[in-house]
Image: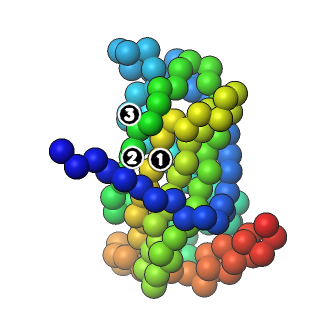
């Protein structure tokens, strides 16, 4: 059976840390797959806030909608583990982008997971359809990359 193989972009756009909570554990007493997806969501929301954007947008700026998600699980994470989420944008287009994630345990730098979500800009307030990438998003990303 062919396995998913993600190749991460080289440039880092954002990092944040999150802890594994008791509610994130599954019957195997380690980080559950759906909990990791929720943590990716949290990291993405923090990244968007860093760029002065939101998932829902407003009447003048579109939000985003998740088109698909891929996760490559590498190791277990356990209750109390502090995880570092490194986010990288690639394939920025007229309507969206791919967002890559690398998740590492901070204490030993062990890679826990790699992930990719395909993001499409979406107008939640008027048309309820996909929208063009807002210039404000492109400029905020560019500014973030220039600072690094």
Q: Is residue 61 visible?
A: yes
Q: Give the label, 3 or 2, closer to the camera.
A: 2
Q: Give the label, 1 or 3, closer to the camera.
A: 1
Q: Is residue 48 visible?
A: no
Q: For the residue labelled by badge 2, is the local secondary structure a helix, a strand or a loop?
A: strand
- The x, y position of residue 10, in whole percent, is 60, 64
According to the picture, the residue beneath numbered tag 3 turns out to be 33
Q: CA distance from mark 1 to mark 2?
A: 6 Å
In the rendered structure, the answer to whether residue 12 lies left or right of residue 36 reads right
Quadrant where the C terminus sits is: bottom right
The residue at the point 56 percent across, 42 percent down is 103
In the rendered structure, the answer to whether residue 63 lies left or right of residue 107 reads left
The answer to which of 99 and 60 lies nearer the viewer is 99
- The x, y position of residue 109, in whole percent, is 65, 35
Does 147 sit above or below residue 22?
A: below
| Mark earlier in primary sequence (3, 2) | 3
The residue at the point 43 percent across, 80 percent down is 95
According to the picture, the residue beneath numbered tag 1 turns out to be 114
Q: Are marks 1 and 2 in contact (CB under 8 Å)?
A: yes
Rate crowding at label 2 as few (under 14), some (14 to 19) or many (20 or more) other CA atoms within 10 Å.
Answer: some
The answer to which of 85 and 50 lies nearer the viewer is 85
Q: How is the image coloured?
A: rainbow
Q: For the residue labelled by badge 3, is the local secondary structure a helix, a strand or a loop?
A: helix
- The x, y position of residue 3, in whole percent, is 28, 47
Q: Residue furthest right?
A: 147
The residue at the point 47 percent across, 30 percent down is 75
Q: For the residue labelled by badge 1, is the local secondary structure a helix, a strand or a loop?
A: strand
According to the picture, the residue beneath numbered tag 2 turns out to be 71
Rate crowding at label 1 as few (under 14), some (14 to 19) or many (20 or more) other CA atoms within 10 Å.
Answer: many
Q: CA distance from mark 3 to mark 2?
A: 9 Å
Quadrant where the N terminus sits is: top left
Q: CA distance from mark 1 to mark 3?
A: 12 Å
């Amino acid at each position: 059976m062919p396995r998913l193989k993600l190749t991460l972009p080289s440039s880092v756009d954002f990092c944040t840390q999150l802890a594994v909570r008791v509610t994130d554990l599954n019957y195997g007493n380690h980080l559950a797959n759906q909990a990791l997806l929720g943590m990716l969501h949290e990291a993405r929301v923090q990244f968007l806030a860093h760029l002065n954007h939101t998932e829902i947008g407003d009447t003048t700026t579109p939000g985003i909608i998740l088109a698909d998600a891929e996760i490559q699980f590498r190791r277990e994470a356990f209750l109390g583990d502090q995880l570092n989420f490194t986010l990288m944008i690639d394939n920025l287009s007229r309507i969206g982008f791919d967002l890559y994630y690398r998740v590492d345990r901070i204490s030993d730098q062990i890679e826990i997971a790699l992930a990719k979500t395909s993001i499409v800009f979406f107008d939640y307030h008027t048309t309820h359809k996909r929208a063009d990438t807002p210039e404000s998003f492109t400029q905020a990303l560019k500014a973030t990359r220039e600072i690094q």
